[in-house]
């Protein structure tokens, strides 16, 4: 702690100690005020401005130091100065003192608190920025809440000082007026209980609730305004309780939940049920990764005591296996299954024509129009195709189209260029390299997988390079050309152009939400990169929700399913109870070899956010099962609160990292620390023991050395 902070704390402590040591509180008792009222009145008559100034300074000091007696000083203000001057002096003195207390808490404690509890306080800070003035005003209106507690607590938040001042000035006015007015009858008061009756306290509570009720009323007014141009077309009855647009993870889960609670629900999907994950993303890519990994293991058979063998295979057979796997999983997401669950499934294009009406252009022809109480938009995302000159002329594939295009090839592309160094690009680059392609990966940034720690990015790059991928970072794609019949990607690196010839070009530079064609523009629903929603996943129309990739902020299948619960439950039961979408513990994994999995903060993010942390790392090269499987590489890295076993985040690099992460996801979700993981029996020999050993590393680093030294002496004594 800085010297200035220490000096301030010492100064405050000395003043408070003097207050109690000298029993200065006796001068702030009701008896003393009543006995001295005549003397104060005489002094006030002789030197009004001196008395006003002294009273003002005394009140500011008492309020600043949070000393007991502010209520009695308020009574004194009324007794000495009357209602007018008393209210004026007390109102400004109390607000100034509260602000000084607020600033002291901010100066001395805020940095430390935010550093230690920054992740936990993020939601509070956002709430204060959004509605802090309203809640502070409500608290100030209710004298049941000690004002000094409010001053200190608000000082730890991000509230602006001027906001705190004017809201406090206004919010404390009613209570101040009551006490000052009571002080004008100071001689007749028997105790403070005579100032505030139960009825008056109840009035204050109702007054404190008024701003919150007013906000609800304002929200209702805003809703009326939003719906105003549609009121004439609002149906009196509805065909459906819920219509869901999109048959991916978000849409399927939303429709399923609605059917389970016996709502009448229609799911609209224009293409394939299961969405991108089943048909173009998670499932086919993991099937490809498995085939590629087996080919890699055959080439490195000596690692397992076998002979190195160059795999011979039909590329078409590999691609056919992928399509067969998709077909095997399709029934899980099929029209037949969801129809059997009670969901009406319509295949066609849905367009919202007003907040309660959806028009569906059916794939088989014709248009069906349905009214509904609520709508969930779960339209998903599509690959982003960069505006690269010449790209259309040379041709390209995306993570969506490659499965069909490459299925027509007799062999893996001889020369494959992968644009993009994110998870999708890395997974596909490594897989096709292992299947025999000469792969060049082009990334504009300084490293691949930039959302991970630099240590992880370096390991990922080394793994890809070991499989033959030429990883080019800091290379910006400029254009595509045809040169003497060859396809060429022109890139720029450190001001110098280079030409990369290819047979196939894969664009894997990200995904963008599907926002057009659903009527969002016509309804005026704001969209930027995603559909804008509030914390309940509502759009500007409270009965229209968004979930999954189209809503953000994450583009993961499991997050889409997670959001779908909130969207569906809020859509169906939000009039009674709404739930804020919870993103506090979001896991994800990149399925390169070795896998990279993460939940919570990594070092990079913790530093960017100024969150204090400790790092504990366990090397998987020391794990018995990993050694037995010839997979002894990678690590478990855990970030914890300094000095505590509370988990802030975990990164795992190694075989089956995505599976190993689940234990930490569970622990973080339910507030379990590393001590609980260490105390859990893990089957031997399994990879999951890596989690236990990581917890053990933390425990060793936090041994009570002083206590153990006494224990050693105890054992020495026991031996005689």
Image: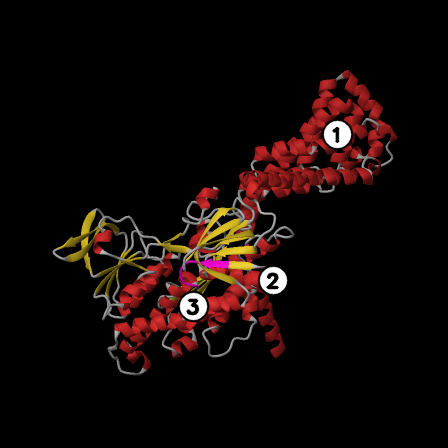
Q: Secondary structure at mark 3?
A: helix
Q: Secondary structure at mark 1?
A: helix
Report the magenta residues as a range.
267-273
In which quadrant is the N terminus drawn? Answer: top right
**Residue name at image x 51 percent, y 47 percent:** 533
Q: Which disc is residue 177 wearing?
A: 1
Sequence-first disc among 2 and 1: 1
Sequence-first disc among 1 and 3: 1
| Residue located farthest toward the bottom when viewing the structure as drawn | 306
Q: Are marks 3 and 2 in contact (CB under 8 Å)?
A: no
- Is residue 587 or residue 229 the one in the foreground? 229
Q: Which disc is residue 657 wearing?
A: 3
- Is residue 17 or residue 47 the one in the foreground? 47
Q: Are marks 2 and 1 in contact (CB under 8 Å)?
A: no
Question: Does the image show residue 665?
Answer: yes
Q: Which disc is residue 261 wearing?
A: 2
Tell me the distance, in whole angstroms, between the alpha carbons under discs 1 and 3.
64 Å
Q: Position of residue 28 (x, y in %)?
A: 78, 34
Q: Position of residue 147 (x, y in %)?
A: 69, 39
**Residue name at image x 59 percent, y 75 percent:** 716
Q: Quadrant of residue 132?
A: top right
From the viewer's perspective, is 210 left or right of 643? right
Q: Are marks 1 and 3 in contact (CB under 8 Å)?
A: no
Residue 704 versus residue 510 in the image, above or below: below
């Amino acid at each position: 702690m800085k010297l200035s902070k220490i000096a301030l704390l010492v100064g405050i402590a000395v003043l408070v100690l003097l207050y109690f040591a000298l029993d200065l509180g006796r001068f702030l008792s009701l008896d003393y005020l009543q006995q001295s009222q005549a003397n104060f009145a005489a002094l006030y008559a002789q030197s009004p401005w001196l008395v006003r100034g002294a009273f003002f300074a005394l009140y500011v000091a008492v309020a600043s130091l949070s000393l007991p007696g502010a209520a009695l000083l308020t009574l004194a203000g009324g007794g000495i100065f009357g209602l007018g001057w008393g209210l004026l002096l007390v109102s400004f003195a109390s607000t100034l003192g509260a602000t000084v207390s607020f600033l002291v808490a901010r100066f001395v404690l805020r940095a430390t608190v935010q550093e230690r509890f920054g992740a936990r306080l993020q939601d509070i800070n956002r709430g204060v920025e959004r509605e802090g003035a309203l809640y502070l005003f409500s608290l100030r209106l209710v004298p049941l809440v000690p004002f000094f507690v409010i001053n200190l607590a608000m000082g730890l938040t991000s509230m602006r000082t001027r906001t705190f001042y004017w809201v406090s000035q206004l919010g404390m006015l009613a209570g101040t007026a009551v006490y000052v007015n009571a002080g004008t009858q100071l001689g007749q008061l028997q105790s403070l209980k005579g100032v505030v009756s139960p009825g008056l306290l109840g009035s204050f509570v109702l007054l404190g609730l008024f701003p919150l009720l007013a906000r609800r009323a304002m929200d209702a007014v805003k809703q009326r305004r939003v719906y105003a141009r549609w009121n004439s077309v609002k149906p009196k009855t509805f065909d459906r309780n819920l219509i869901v647009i999109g048959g991916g993870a978000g849409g399927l889960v939303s429709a399923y939940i609605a059917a389970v609670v016996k709502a009448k629900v229609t799911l609209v999907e224009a293409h394939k049920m299961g969405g991108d994950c089943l048909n173009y993303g998670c499932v086919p890519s993991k099937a490809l990764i498995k085939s590629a990994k087996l080919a890699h293991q055959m080439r490195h058979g000596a690692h397992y005591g076998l002979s190195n063998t160059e795999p011979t295979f039909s590329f078409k057979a590999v691609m056919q296996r992928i399509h067969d796997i998709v077909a095997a999983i399709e029934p899980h997401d099929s029209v037949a299954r969801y129809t059997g669950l009670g969901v009406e499934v319509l295949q066609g294009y849905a367009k919202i024509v007003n907040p309660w009406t959806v028009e569906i252009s059916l794939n088989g022809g014709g248009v069906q129009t349905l009214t509904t109480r609520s709508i969930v938009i779960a339209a998903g995302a599509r690959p982003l195709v960069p505006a690269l000159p010449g790209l259309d002329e040379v041709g390209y594939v995306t993570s969506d189209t490659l499965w069909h295009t490459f299925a027509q090839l007799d062999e893996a592309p001889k020369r494959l260029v992968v644009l993009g160094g994110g998870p999708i690009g890395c997974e596909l680059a490594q897989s096709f390299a292992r299947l025999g392609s000469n792969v060049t990966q082009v990334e504009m940034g300084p490293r691949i997988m930039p959302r991970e720690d630099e240590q992880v990015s370096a390991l990922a790059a080394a793994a890809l390079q070991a499989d033959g991928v030429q990883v080019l970072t800091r290379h910006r794609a400029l254009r595509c050309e045809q040169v003497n019949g060859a396809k060429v990607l022109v890139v720029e690196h450190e001001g110098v152009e280079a030409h990369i010839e290819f047979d196939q070009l894969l664009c894997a530079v990200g995904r963008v939400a599907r926002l057009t064609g659903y009527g969002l523009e016509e309804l005026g629903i704001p969209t930027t990169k995603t559909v804008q929603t509030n914390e309940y996943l509502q759009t500007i129309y409270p009965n229209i929700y968004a979930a999954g990739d189209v809503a953000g902020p994450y583009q993961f299948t499991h997050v889409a399913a997670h959001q779908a619960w909130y969207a569906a439950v809020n859509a169906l039961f939000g009039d009674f109870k709404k739930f804020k979408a919870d993103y506090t513990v979001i896991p994800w994994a990149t399925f390169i070899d070795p896998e990279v999995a993460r939940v919570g903060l990594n070092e990079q993010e913790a530093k960017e956010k100024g969150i204090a942390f400790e790092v504990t790392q366990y090397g998987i090269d020391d794990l018995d099962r990993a050694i037995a499987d010839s997979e002894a590489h990678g690590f478990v890295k855990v970030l914890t609160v300094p000095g505590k076993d509370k988990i802030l985040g975990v990164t795992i690099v190694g075989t089956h990292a995505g599976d190993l992460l689940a234990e930490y996801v569970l622990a973080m979700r339910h507030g379990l620390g590393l001590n609980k993981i260490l105390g859990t029996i893990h089957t031997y020999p399994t990879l999951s023991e890596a989690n236990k050993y990581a917890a053990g590393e933390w425990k060793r680093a936090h041994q009570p050395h002083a206590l153990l030294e006494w224990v050693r002496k105890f054992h020495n004594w026991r031996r005689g």
